[in-house]
Image (spheres, grey):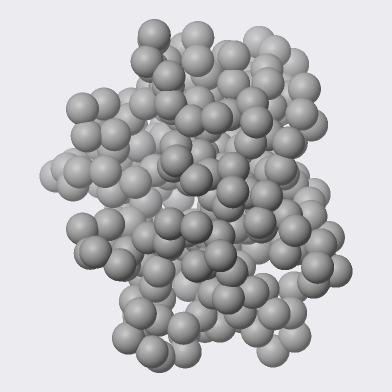
Amino acid sequence: MAGKSVVDINCDMGESYGVYRLGQDQELLRYVSSVSIACGFHAGDPSIMRETIALAQAAKVSIGAHPGYPDLMGFGRRSMQLSPTEVFDAIVYQVGAFLGVAKSLGVAGTHVKVHGALYNLAASDVVIAQAVSQAVRAVDDQLILVGLANSRLIEAGLALGLKVSREAFVDRRYQADGSLVPRSHPHALYHSFGEARDQVKEILTTGLVTAITGEKVPVVADTFCVHGEGPHALEFARGMVALVAEQNITLSGLKRL
């Protein structure tokens, strides 16, 4: 298939907590076009949220909510047995808080991207995907729902009439079913953009990705994620911007896609 002409580069931000600082948010804002800001459950707090929204506003990037499981100790990356109603309530609570802080700064939120273990579960579990999508629609049906390309979450969002953005990952490897290789796997992550470059270029130009087991898997993506908390986040962000320019692809925030 033909390659993309316009893409977004997004980054998860605002994942510090109190005096504990994580990530290189201010530096990364020079390279990304959208950010998803933690809402206090897996990371972040009200003051960090406000500070990060203000930084993103000054950088003129699209700004969205990044809700997750109530799991500060595990950074939202541990599985939790929440019911669909509990998931719905957790998303509504966090997105509502984010939008309130954003409104106090005169900023309009553009999207919602769930975090970590909840993101992965919503990608594969129809019921949880529906709960997440229903929560986003209940808060603001104009918000863009970001989800893993070809996932149950994207299907659920479309079924409810939401705008969606299909996501690929710059620093993660893929399985044959299009899901991400679990972080517990020794080869789940790329540790430099040099390692990841061929995979990202393949997704950008062909809409395919080579799975860790060798299969070609369809992955048509509108937005590419750089994990902001990673030690090589700046390298990945710079490399991604350079590759997009090399391929004559326009970089645009989610609000303009």
Q: Is residue 169 visible?
A: yes
Q: Position of residue 235 (x, y in %)?
A: 59, 48
Residue at position x 43%, y 26% from top?
22
The C terminus sits in image quarter: bottom right
User: Could you say which quadrant of the image residue 76 lies in?
Assistant: top left
The N terminus sits in image quarter: bottom right
Q: Is residue 123 visible?
A: no
- Horizontal side of 92 relative to 60 (left or right) equals left
The residue lying toward the viewer, choosing from 71 and 132, is 71
Residue at position x 48%, y 30% from top?
23
Q: Residue furthest left?
A: 81
Residue at position x 58%, y 29% from top?
25
Q: Position of residue 30 (x, y in %)?
A: 73, 36
- Count of all numbered marks drawn on residues in the image: 0
Residue 174, placed above or below residue 58: below
Q: Position of residue 57 (x, y in %)?
A: 74, 24
Residue 215, placed above or below residue 194: below
- Horizontal side of 47 relative to 243 (left or right) equals left
The residue lying toward the viewer, choosing from 119 and 235, is 235
The residue lying toward the viewer, choosing from 20 and 180, is 20
Q: Position of residue 32 (x, y in %)?
A: 69, 43
Residue at position x 40%, y 81% from top?
211
